[in-house]
C-alpha cells in the first residue's frame, strides 16, 4: 500500500529538527490549514464542474464546453465574474450579521474536515470523538443560514431561514443516529479506529440489513442537511426565489456555494468512511490474494472513489426528483426516518451484543 | 351559490399580516403576474392577483386595423397557442364574411392546431416540473417542443408568433417535407411521453405534491368560468372540439379527456392524456390531407355586413372566444376576446387558500397560465 506516510513523516522530521516539537506542531497546523483551504477551494471547483456535467448528462445537454478543455475552466471564469460583482447589502438589513453569515458557513464546513482520514497518514487530527465532533460541527451551518435569512431584510429569505432551521435540526437526528450504528458496530468514535475495524470487510458488507438501512437513512438525512434537492427548501427557487441567499451578491453568494459543495464532500466522505471503509481497500475476509491485489490501489484513491460515488448519488437525486413541501419534509423525518432509525439502532444493538455480524 | 360566503372578497392587509409579493419578477409566475399573498407561517391565508403589467390593448388595436390585420396581434396573446388563436380569428372573420374554407385548409388547420397543443402541453409539463422543483423535465420537454417548432418554422417561417391561419384558409401551402417530418416525429413523441411518465408521473414526491392539492370542485370550476384542462380536471365536460366542433373536428376520432379528481394531479393527468389524443388526431389526418386549394378566394379588403358574431375554439388552455361586431366598414367596430387564462386565474384564490406556499406554486403550475393572454 502506498500512503502519504512517507511524505508527512519526512515533513514532520525536518520541521522537528529545525524548530523543535512545539514549533513543528504549530507550523504543521498552519500548513494543514493552508492545504485544507486550497484543497477545499479546488474541491468545490471540481464539484461545481462535476455537478454541471452530471446535470448535463441527466438533461441531455452539453454543459460547459467552451472555456478550457471541455469547459473545465468555466468555474474559474464564474469565480472571476463573482469577484467583480459589486458587494452590497440591502437597505435596512443588519449589515454586520449579513456579512458574517457566509463566513460562519465556510468556517463550520472547514472545521468538519479535521478528523476525516483521507489516507492512513493524511488526517489533520485523530481525536477519539471524531464522529461526535463532525456531527456537532456540521450542524453549525444552520446558524449561518438562519443569520443570513434573518439579516437580509427579505421575507423570502426569512422564510427560507425558518424552513432550513426546522429542516436541518430535524434531519440532524436521523443522520446522527445512523452514525451511531457504525459506532456501535466498531466500538469506537475515532475515524481511524472505524476505518481500521473495516480491514477485513466494509461495514456495509459485514453488518447485514441494519447497516444498509442506516446507510440509506444517512444518505437521505445527509442530503436534507445539505439543503440539496429534493430537500432544498431553504432555497426553493420556484417558491422563495433563492430563499436565504436571495440577497447575497458576488463573493458572499459564492461562499454559500463553496460551503454547500464542501459540505457535500464532507458528508460523502463521512458516509464513505463509516459505511464503505474510507481509505480501506476492498478487503473480503480471508481472500488474501484478492485483498493483496486491492492493496495495490493507493488508499487515497479508494477514499476519493467512494466519496465521489456518494456525491454522484446525491447529484443524481438533485437532477431527478421534484422538491418536497415543508410539511411533507418534516413528516418524512419525524414519522418515518426517525422511528425507523431508532428501531434500527435497537436491532443494531442486538446484532452487536449477540455477535451476529461477520 | 355565493362562493364568497365565508371569505371576504377584498384583500385586507393589516400591520400584523405577513404579506409576500410573488411576482411580477418571480420564477414561478411565468411572466409578469403579481400575486399578493397573505401568509400565516407557511399557510396561505389570502391571495390576490394583480394584473396589468403587460397590458398592450390588443382589443383596441384590433379595432384600428382591418379584418385581416388583427390576427397578427392575437399570436402575441397566448403565445404558446398562437396557431389556435389565429384560427379563432380566422373563424370569426369567415363567419362574418360567410366564406367556405377549402377542405385541405381545414385539415391543415387541425394538424397545426393539434401540433400546437402538443408543443404547448410539452412546455407546460417541463414548467410544472420546474415549479415543483425538478429541473430536468424542462430540458426533456424542450427537446420535443423544438422538434415541433422546427416543423412549424419550415412551413410558416415562425416558431412562436405564427400568423399562418388567415380568413379563408391558411396563408401558404404546407412545406413538401411537412408530412414526412410529422410522421417521423409521432413515434418519437409517443416514446417520449412514456419517458415523461417515468421521470415525473410515477415519482412519489410528485404524487405527494399534487394529489389533493389545489382542489377545485366542478361547481366552482363552472362558476368561475374555468375551461380547458382546468375544468376537465374537475370533471366538467367542456371540450369545444367535441361540444361545438369547428374546422372538421367532428370527423376525427378522439376522446374528451375527463378526470374527476379536481386537484393538481387530475389536471396534470388531463394534459398528459390530451397529448396522446393530439398525437392520435394528427396520426389520423397526416396521411389523408386532401388535394385542392389551401385558401378560398376572398376580397383583398374584407367588409362584413353589419352584425355581430361569436366563435370559440379550444386552445391548449381552454376556451378562446372571439366576439366580433361589424358596422359594415373595413374596420371591426368591436373585438373582444374571451380568454381562458383570465377565468382560470380567477379560481386561484379558491384553490390555494388554506394550502401551503408550495401548494400555491404547484396550483399555479397546473393552471398553466400564460400572462399576456390575461392582460390583453
Image (tube, rainbow, N blue to C red):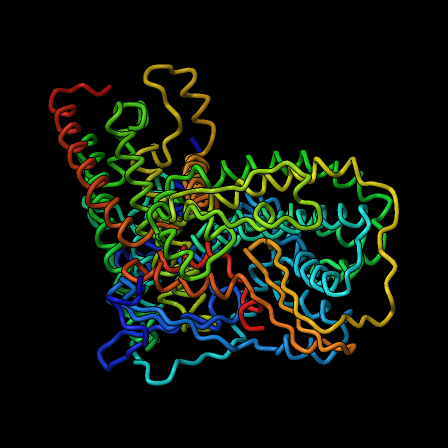
Image quarter hosting the C terminus of chain A? top left
Examine the rendering and report whether any part of residue A27 can be seen.
no
Q: How many marks?
A: 0
Residue A9 or residue B361, whichever sits in front: B361
Place of residue A228 in the rendered image (x, y in percent of width and height, measured from the top left): 38, 52
Place of residue B188 in the rendered image (x, y in percent of width and height, measured from the top left): 66, 36
Q: Is residue A230 above or below residue B360?
A: above
Q: Is residue B214 above or below residue A187?
A: below
Examine the rendering and report whether any part of residue B305 can be seen.
yes
Quick one: which residue is furthest to the bottom in this view?
A92
Residue B137 or residue A282, whichever sits in front: B137
With A274 as the anchor, is B138 left or right in this view? right
Place of residue B184 in the rendered image (x, y in percent of width and height, measured from the top left): 74, 36
With B60 as the anchor, is B354 left or right in this view? left
Image quarter hosting the N terminus of chain A? top left
Residue B230 or residue A174, whichever sits in front: B230
Q: Is residue A228 above or below residue A209?
A: below
- Residue at image point 29% right, 28% down: A203
With B174 as the anchor, is B3 left or right in this view? left
Residue B6 or residue A226, whichever sits in front: B6
- Residue at image point 23% right, 28% down: A210
Place of residue B113 in the rendered image (x, y in percent of width and height, measured from the top left): 68, 51
Amino acid at each position: 500500500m502506498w500512503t502519504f506516510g512517507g511524505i508527512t513523516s519526512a515533513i514532520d522530521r525536518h520541521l522537528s529538527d529545525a524548530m523543535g516539537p512545539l514549533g513543528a506542531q504549530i507550523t504543521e497546523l498552519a500548513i494543514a490549514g493552508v492545504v485544507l483551504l486550497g484543497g477545499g477551494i479546488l474541491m468545490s471547483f471540481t464539484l461545481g464542474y462535476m455537478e454541471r456535467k452530471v446535470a448535463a448528462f441527466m438533461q441531455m445537454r452539453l454543459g460547459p464546453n467552451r472555456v478550457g478543455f471541455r469547459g473545465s475552466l468555466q468555474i474559474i471564469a464564474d469565480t472571476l465574474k463573482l469577484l467583480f460583482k459589486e458587494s452590497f447589502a440591502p437597505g435596512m438589513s443588519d449589515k454586520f450579521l449579513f456579512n458574517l453569515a457566509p463566513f460562519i458557513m465556510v468556517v463550520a464546513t472547514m472545521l468538519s474536515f479535521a478528523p476525516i482520514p483521507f489516507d492512513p497518514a493524511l488526517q489533520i487530527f485523530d481525536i477519539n470523538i471524531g464522529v461526535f465532533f463532525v456531527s456537532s460541527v456540521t450542524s453549525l451551518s444552520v446558524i449561518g443560514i438562519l443569520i443570513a435569512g434573518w439579516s437580509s431584510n427579505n421575507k423570502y429569505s426569512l422564510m427560507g431561514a425558518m424552513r432550513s432551521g426546522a429542516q436541518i435540526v430535524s434531519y440532524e437526528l436521523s443522520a446522527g443516529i445512523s452514525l451511531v450504528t457504525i459506532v456501535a458496530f466498531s466500538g469506537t468514535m475515532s475515524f481511524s479506529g472505524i476505518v481500521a475495524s473495516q480491514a477485513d470487510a466494509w461495514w456495509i458488507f459485514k453488518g447485514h440489513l441494519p447497516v444498509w438501512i442506516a446507510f440509506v437513512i444517512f444518505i437521505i438525512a445527509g442530503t436534507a442537511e445539505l439543503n440539496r434537492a429534493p430537500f432544498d427548501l431553504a432555497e426553493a427557487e420556484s417558491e422563495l426565489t433563492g430563499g436565504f441567499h436571495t440577497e447575497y451578491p458576488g463573493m458572499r453568494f459564492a461562499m454559500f456555494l463553496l460551503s454547500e459543495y464542501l459540505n457535500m464532500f464532507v458528508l460523502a466522505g463521512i458516509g464513505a468512511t463509516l459505511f464503505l471503509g474510507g481509505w480501506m481497500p476492498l478487503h473480503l475476509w480471508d481472500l488474501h490474494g484478492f485483498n493483496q491485489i486491492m492493496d495495490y490501489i493507493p488508499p487515497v484513491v479508494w477514499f476519493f472513489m467512494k466519496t465521489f460515488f456518494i456525491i454522484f448519488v446525491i447529484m443524481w437525486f438533485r437532477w431527478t426528483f421534484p422538491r418536497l413541501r415543508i410539511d411533507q419534509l418534516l413528516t418524512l423525518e419525524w414519522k418515518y426516518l426517525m422511528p425507523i432509525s431508532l428501531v434500527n439502532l435497537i436491532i443494531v444493538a442486538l446484532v452487536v451484543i449477540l455477535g451476529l455480524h461477520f | 351559490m355565493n362562493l364568497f360566503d365565508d371569505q371576504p372578497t377584498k384583500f385586507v392587509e393589516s400591520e400584523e399580516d405577513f404579506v409576500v409579493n410573488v411576482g411580477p419578477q418571480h420564477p414561478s409566475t411565468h411572466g409578469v403576474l403579481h400575486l399578493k399573498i397573505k401568509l400565516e407561517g407557511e399557510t396561505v391565508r389570502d391571495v390576490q392577483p394583480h394584473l396589468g403589467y403587460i397590458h398592450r390593448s390588443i382589443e383596441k388595436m384590433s379595432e384600428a386595423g382591418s379584418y385581416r390585420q388583427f390576427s397578427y396581434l392575437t399570436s402575441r396573446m397566448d403565445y404558446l397557442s398562437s396557431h389556435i388563436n389565429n384560427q379563432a380569428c380566422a373563424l370569426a372573420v369567415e363567419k362574418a364574411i360567410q366564406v367556405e374554407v377549402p377542405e385541405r385548409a381545414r385539415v391543415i388547420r387541425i394538424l397545426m392546431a393539434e401540433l400546437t397543443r402538443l408543443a404547448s402541453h410539452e412546455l407546460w409539463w417541463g414548467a410544472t416540473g420546474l415549479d415543483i422543483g425538478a429541473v430536468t423535465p424542462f430540458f426533456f420537454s424542450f427537446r420535443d417542443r423544438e422538434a415541433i417548432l422546427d416543423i412549424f418554422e419550415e412551413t410558416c417561417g415562425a416558431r412562436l408568433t405564427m400568423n399562418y391561419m388567415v380568413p379563408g384558409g391558411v396563408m401558404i401551402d404546407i412545406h413538401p417535407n411537412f408530412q414526412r417530418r410529422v410522421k417521423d416525429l409521432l413515434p418519437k413523441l409517443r416514446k417520449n411521453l412514456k419517458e415523461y411518465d417515468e421521470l415525473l408521473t410515477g415519482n412519489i414526491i410528485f404524487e405527494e405534491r399534487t394529489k389533493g392539492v389545489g382542489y377545485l370542485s366542478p361547481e366552482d370550476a363552472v362558476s368561475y368560468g374555468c375551461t380547458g384542462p382546468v375544468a376537465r380536471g374537475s370533471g366538467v365536460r367542456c371540450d369545444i372540439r367535441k361540444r361545438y366542433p369547428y374546422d372538421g373536428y367532428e370527423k376525427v376520432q378522439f376522446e374528451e379527456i375527463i378526470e374527476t379528481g379536481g386537484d393538481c394531479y387530475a389536471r396534470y393527468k388531463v394534459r398528459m392524456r390530451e397529448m396522446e389524443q393530439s398525437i392520435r388526431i394528427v396520426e389520423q389526418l397526416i396521411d389523408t390531407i386532401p388535394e385542392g386549394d389551401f385558401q378560398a378566394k376572398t376580397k383583398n379588403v374584407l367588409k362584413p355586413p353589419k352584425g355581430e358574431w361569436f366563435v370559440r375554439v379550444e386552445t391548449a388552455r381552454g376556451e378562446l372566444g372571439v366576439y366580433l361586431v361589424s358596422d359594415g366598414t373595413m374596420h371591426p367596430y368591436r373585438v373582444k376576446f374571451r380568454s381562458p387564462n383570465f377565468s382560470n386565474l380567477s379560481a386561484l384564490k379558491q384553490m390555494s387558500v388554506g394550502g401551503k406556499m408550495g401548494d400555491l406554486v404547484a396550483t399555479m403550475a397546473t393552471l398553466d397560465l400564460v400572462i399576456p393572454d390575461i392582460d390583453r
